[in-house]
Image (cartoon, helix red, strand yellow):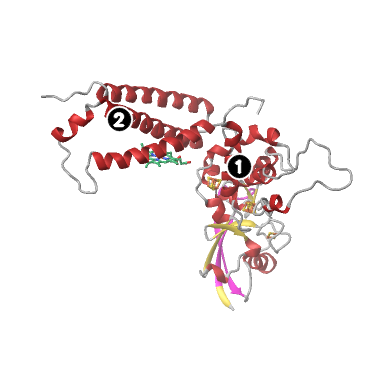
Amino acid sequence: MTEKRASGGFYAWLLQRITGVVLAVLLIAHFIVTHGLPHPSGVTYARIAPRLATPTWKVIDMLFLACALYHGLNGVWMVLQDYVESEGMQTFLFGVLCVLGAILFFLGAITVIPFAVQA
Amino acid sequence: MAEYTFRIFRYDPEKDEQGRVQDYTFEVQEGWTILDALNHIKWFIDGTLTYRRACRHGICGSCGMTINGKNNIACETQIKDLGTSTITIEPLRGFPVIKDLVVNMEPFYDKLYAVKPYLITRTPPPTDRERYQSPEDRAKLDGKYECILCGCCTSSCPTYWADKNFLGPNALLKASKFMLDSRDEGFEDRVNCIDDKHGIWRCHTIFNCVEACPKELNPTKGIVELRRLMMRGRL
Ligand code: HEM
Ligand code: SF4
Ligand code: SF4
Ligand code: FES
């Protein structure tokens, strides 16, 4: 391919599938590790908090956060592209989704990253 | 002989503001198709009923309509196979109605023309024979070339209902037919139209088109194969 061409949503489509797979894997891990499936055990601060404070789980949870936000908001964007006719309105709503994503990512990050076990 | 009631969508742009439903009840003969019933109405009961048909054996693609909620061609739909004595017949969804069961197919053809539905070549053909295609390469086009352009697929596609600029299953299946043809060299000519905002990435794999196609073609499979081709060009 020599000529560069504009993408009509290939990367959004691909990332929706990649984040979907990552979410499925992380979701299963989440239910096993946090909720103790297949033998559910109490989700208590004492049991959960020390793990959440480790760097490994902070990285995993940040990945979870990024994938869930991208997947959810990109999914809404896909629906909007189908149902909103006006290009101007689409651009506006795309902006709203980006701002919403940025705010939610920030709120998630300041919760996950500095987390430490309280005495 | 059994009695059936046909509930048919009627719309006359010169008289009606909105569509209405008209019932016709009569005895149907063994072996009749929906097209036979429509012909019976038009010839013997109500000459104002308007619908398209030509070949009456499933090859011209004129008689696509919505029968008991499902898109099909009237001439290949056996009345007794429907399993109901009241049969609802509506024009194809998603296209503007002109009169009764006749819809404006221009938007459908526009999408088809957009994907350049003909063999595009750059190298000159051999002088002593036709362009060669191996039986294996030819077999890759099975399930892609048999389309009769009835519109049943695109008219059943929820993405098309929502976005009238969406290329739709028919145009994408046609595109896959040419882009996966070993003799075709038109990838660059078609790619920007397929890889468009209203192109191939808009399909949500709902499979309505597969269910609708009277020729039992699989536009979704064509779309998936085309996506694979698009991906190879990108990654
Ligand atoms: C189990 C993990 C998940 C997998 C494997 C997955 C997979 C997918 C796939 C493949 C699509 C694209 C469908 C299409 O082409 O239309 C999609 C769309 C979507 N997903 Fe997920 N997803 C998962 C979890 C989630 C979660 C947790 C949310 C909510 C935050 C979500 C929200 C959405 C939305 C809103 C859409 C767009 C709907 C649509 O286009 O039809 N998904 N998902
Ligand atoms: S599979 Fe794709 S093209 Fe076919 S009906 Fe569904 S959205 Fe439309
Ligand atoms: S793919 Fe099938 S349903 Fe669609 S136009 Fe062709 S024959 Fe009709
Ligand atoms: S009349 Fe030709 S396909 Fe039905």
- Residue depth check, mark 1 versus mark 2: number of the one nearer the observer: 2
Which range is magenta?
B4-28
In the foreground, B105 or B216: B216
For residue A61, the mark is 2
On screen, residue A12 versus residue B183, left or right, reads: left
Query: Does the residue at mark 1 contact the one at mark 2 (Cβ under 8 Å)?
Result: no
Residue A7, horizontal then vertical, whole percent: 57, 29
Per the rendering, the mark at residue B206 is none
**Residue B226 numbered mark, or none:** 1
Tell me which image quadrant ligand 1 sits in.
Answer: top left
Is A7 within the magenta?
A: no
**Which quarter of the rendered picture does the C terminus of chain B lie within?**
top right
Q: Amino acid at mark 1?
A: Leu
Q: In which image quadrant can residue A114 be found?
A: top left
Main secondary-structure element of the magenta-colored stretch? strand
Q: Is residue B25 above or below residue B89?
A: below
